[in-house]
Image: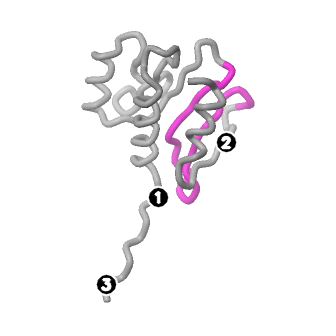
Amino acid sequence: MTPDALADFCLSLPQAVETFPFGEVTSVFKTQGNGKIFALTALAGEPLTVSLKCDPEESRALREEFPGQITPGYHLNKRHWITIVLDGQVEDALVEQLLSDSHALVRPKVPRAPVR
């Protein structure tokens, strides 16, 4: 996955915005409405990595399946965040699914339509 593909995918998710609260180097992808972060990356980083929210049980399984490529979140809550090295060893489809799942964990809840 390229830096452009990563940014484009993150921004394709509903209500997603890119911000730079930690300086020009780190892209932080949040949801509008509640401002919660679902992904962080240094798009110019070598190697390219992305940190995202993940269910703790799934996180443990992923770290076991991809040692060295998926690790506890760098400078984040190690229980709820993972960091993925985007060097091709983790398929793009899985990365996209994990980004979508991360987004789903933090996105604002849509109010239910009133029952008539």
Q: Which of these two is toward me, 98 or 76?
A: 98
**SS for callout 2:** strand
The quadrant of the rendering that contains the N terminus is: top right
Which residue position is annotated with label 1?
Answer: 108
Identify residue type, mark 2: Thr
Residue at screen point 31% across, 36% down: 55
Residue 36 in the image: above or below residue 9? below
Q: Position of residue 71 (x, y in %)?
A: 40, 18
Marker disc for residue 19 = 2
Mark nearer the N terminus (3 vs 2): 2
Identify residue type, mark 3: Val
What range of the chain is rendered magenta? 23-44
Count of numbered circles on the image: 3
Identify residue type, mark 1: Pro
Marker disc for residue 115 = 3
> Image check: 86 left or right of 56?
right
